Image (tube, rainbow, N blue to C red):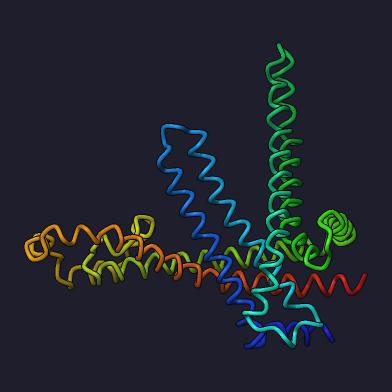
Amino acid sequence: MKFTDNLLYSFNNKSFKTKFFVTWFFIFLGISLSIVFINIGANFLKQKNIYLLFQYTGLFFIFISAISSMGSTQISNFKKNQEIFNPFTLFKISIKKIGTFIIISLIILLFLIIVLGIEILFSYAGTIKFAGPVIISLSTIPVLFYNLFCSLFLICLSIIYPLVAVETKNIYTAFKDTLLFLKKNWIHTLIYLMISSTVLYLCIELIFKLLMYCSGIAQAVSWNIKIGYPKIVTLFSGKSVFSTFVQQMVPAPDPIATYKEFGTKALKYLPLFKHFMKICYIFFISFILAFPLTVFSNLTSVIYNKIKDKE
């Protein structure tokens, strides 16, 4: 199949919807687990190490969900599977690979820790009398290039490794194949990732800005009743001419009248209602984010397969 035909086929209605729904599931699951761990960590503000452990673990779940969505997209793009996949079938196969995706995420995390650990150890050179500050001053450019190289390598590894891993049964073999692929095609990989990552960033930034202003208008229409909006949504809501106009036109909330009518009975259901609204927002936001991520992972998979076929 020609590259253009393969690209068009991977973005046809049936194929794209299959990848989208599986990506949506992983993103929803990752964000949900992340919020759970971040909320648990908020109970340990006085114990900084435990607090940070829960916070970073929560963010790590989002990273795992992104890795899993990349891998599931690659599975669906196999030539032998393109005709048979539906969302449920792809979901079942992807779940079987979830252990692989978690191990990949841990390997990438280990590399990140090693990269930062080397820099931290190097910083102790500054404690050397007289020569220490000079060494640190002269090493700023090498350290900058070290960070740039390691950052690009980790980004490439995060994107290519899941694609290679779904084709092999051995994580170690997949890692060697990934390094070999990057060694042979590092120029093409970097060029593509710079373009695609920029487009992905701009799309997410545009969606984020649009959600900010839409949220501001929605809050104004909803009488600015804060209970209907999780705290993070309220913080990131943006004001505009339209939201200010709507806020001036809609009636104001009357909590005193509500209290007189329902008394303390309404307070019993308040925590349950807040959790329900959080789930609804996670469901909605993950649905929005799944679209650009599906486009990115699908395009990456198709180009990766094309480059690999040429080897």
Position of the N terminus by quadrant: bottom right
Looking at the rendered structure, the number of numbered marks drawn on it comes to 0
Q: Residue at x 70, y 73 (%)?
A: 93
Q: Quadrant of residue 127?
A: top right
Where residue 62 appears, as percent x and y from the top left, is: 57, 57
Q: Residue at x 42, y 43 (%)?
A: 42
Where residue 67 appears, as percent x and y from the top left, is: 67, 61
Q: Residue at x 73, y 49 (%)?
A: 107
Residue occupying the far right of the picture: 311
**Is residue 175 or residue 155 the one in the foreground?**
175
**Is residue 111 or residue 192 the one in the foreground?**
111
Q: Residue at x 43, y 69 (%)?
A: 210
Q: Is residue 184 left or right of residue 75?
A: right
**Is residue 293 or residue 190 the one in the foreground?**
293
Where residue 172 appears, as percent x and y from the top left, is: 84, 53
The relative height of residue 21 versus residue 69 in the rendered view (above or below) is below
**Is residue 187 or residue 276 the one in the foreground?**
276
The relative height of residue 5 versus residue 298 in the rendered view (above or below) is below
The relative height of residue 27 versus residue 47 in the rendered view (above or below) is below
Q: Is residue 165 left or right of residue 47?
A: right
Position of the C terminus by quadrant: bottom right
